[in-house]
Image: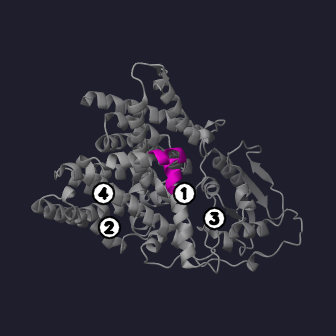
Amino acid sequence: MTTLQHAARIGLLMAGAAALLGWVLCHSEATSNDGLRYIHEAEQIDRGAWRDGLVQGIDHPLHPLGIVATHRLIGGNGPASWQRAALALCFASVILLVLPSYLLAHELFDDRTAWLACVLVLVNPIVGSIVVNVLSESTFVLWWTFGLWGAARFFREGRFLWLPMAIGFGALAYLTRPEGMLLPAAVVLTLWLLPMVRATRINWPRWWRALAFLAAGVVLLVGPYVAVKGGLGTKPAIARVLGLAPRSGPLDLEREAPLPADQSPVETYRAATVRMLEVFAAATTPPLLPIALVGIALAAVQTARIRAWLFLGIVLAGSAVGLVRLHATGGYCTVRHGLVPGIILTMAAAYGLSWAMSRVAIPGRWLGLGQDRLRPGPAVWAVLLAFLVVLPNLRALGPPNAGSFSVYHAAGRWIAQHAGPAEGILDLTDWSLYFSQRPGARFGDVYEAGDDPNLRWILARPSQVEGQWPYSQVLRDLIADRAPVAVIPPRAEAGQVQIQVYDRRSAAAWTASSTNADAHPRPTRRR
């Protein structure tokens, strides 16, 4: 294919990605509170509090800085303008992700696989979810994939032209999220392993220069940030993963379930390994995982790319270890944490499908009927691909909504209209309180909220009230079996976010299970 043909493909894929993300935004709602933290940091930076937003914030700075730049570009005032800026940044980042995804798949496989890999990566529900929830993974994965492409080109060709790209984009990925450190670490480890196998060796002068160049580049690009922060990162999660901080408490809010008091380390790591495998499967989408393993087996035997696949194998292994440590030390591991291995495995699945189509399909016969045999033709493969695309996205086929944050906007308006100036508010969605522009307690303050004698209003999703988490029982005690005074929206469709508003000054139904919130143990830290 010519360069112009590749460019046309990329342009069409970007247009398709924009249309798909537009559909997802109109049929999905935000369910994570984490994106609001980046907006708060961006607001601090915009006000001139650079030290608070960049140095003292727990998150790495590039995503908040991107929100600031986008907000100044599109303009506006108030919380809604910052939410739109964050959404626009994430939307644009995922559209641009088409370019490095196409280049990486083309580098690792061939022309035919490149477009299919982009399609399968972009239709993965987790990609739409990080945009809807304005999470930093959207910008992180853009830099990461560019860096991955540069490293793969370097290991295949051995030309120093590609090493600065791998280092530069790896630094951008690290300055967005701490797991970006995996990219330069994997490059270094791959370089150390190359001399051990004759098929992967490069000449010694080039090997030494590559190591020296990599070390100098990493120190120059991220060294000042590490020095200012006083470490690789201040996020509690990364400190626990690296063994620099103790694991989270048995009842800490970030845990998916309370940690049993008698659980042994062996059982902890067994459960963490199972969760890691589940995340790998979900990040790839279960129907594609076995196809991905076939694709890796087919690609790994190609001697021209053996160094690149050694590097990718180290990345996958490092991701697996990191996810196991994350669950074992923090008690949680979500699908979005598996984006890095998920993209690699999805591209491998595209190669497996492309290989199967080239071996089985009959050229020139749409249905595959011919030669007294029934073999899959292009139409059959098109139906199969449509199935693989639609199956993980069934939730996005529901009725449209007024916007991914419309429910939180409505709840914010309600609380702004009904809550008095001196009345305390506890908002477990975080977003509703933000849009109301009222002070109050948030999700991280749920255990301490009952100590406020002025606490009157509580906003929560039904799953938070009815759940089995330790904080859910504390929340039920604060509500004391009261009925919600407002439900937004009154009738929710399947999968739609609904917010219930409780008034603690209304009459409460007494039950034998009603106890004081102080009777429940509280964690000593928050996420």
Q: Earlier in the sequence, mark 2 or mark 3?
A: 2
The answer for how far apart the CA atoms under marks 2 and 1 are is: 34 Å
The answer for how far apart the CA atoms under marks 2 and 3 are is: 30 Å
Residue 404 percent across, percent down from the top left: 59, 44
Q: Earlier in the sequence, mark 3 or mark 1?
A: 1
Q: How many marks overall?
A: 4
Residue contact at pointers 4 and 1, CB within 8 angstroms:
no
Q: Specify start and end residues of the magenta stretch as a single range.
A: 279-291
The answer for how far apart the CA atoms under marks 4 and 2 are is: 26 Å
Q: Can residue 149 be seen from the camera position used here?
A: yes
What residue is pinned by disc 4? 311
Q: Secondary structure at mark 2?
A: helix
Please tell me whether mark 2 or mark 1 is closer to you in this view.
Answer: 1
The answer for how far apart the CA atoms under marks 4 and 3 are is: 40 Å
Q: Does 419 appear above or below 76?
A: below
Amino acid type of the residue tagged 1 in the rendering: Glu
What residue is pinned by disc 1? 278
Residue 83's label in the rendered image is none
Amino acid type of the residue tagged 2 in the rendering: Tyr
Residue contact at pointers 3 and 1, CB within 8 angstroms:
no
The answer for how far apart the CA atoms under marks 4 and 1 are is: 23 Å
- Is 290 inside the magenta-drawn segment? yes
Residue contact at pointers 2 and 1, CB within 8 angstroms:
no
Q: Secondary structure at mark 3?
A: helix
- Which residue is painted at 78% across and 59% down in the image? 502
Give whichever of 404, 17 is nearer the camera: 17
What residue is pinned by disc 2? 225
Please tell me whether mark 4 or mark 3 is closer to you in this view.
Answer: 4
Image side of residue 68 versus residue 308, left or right: right
Residue 443's label in the rendered image is 3
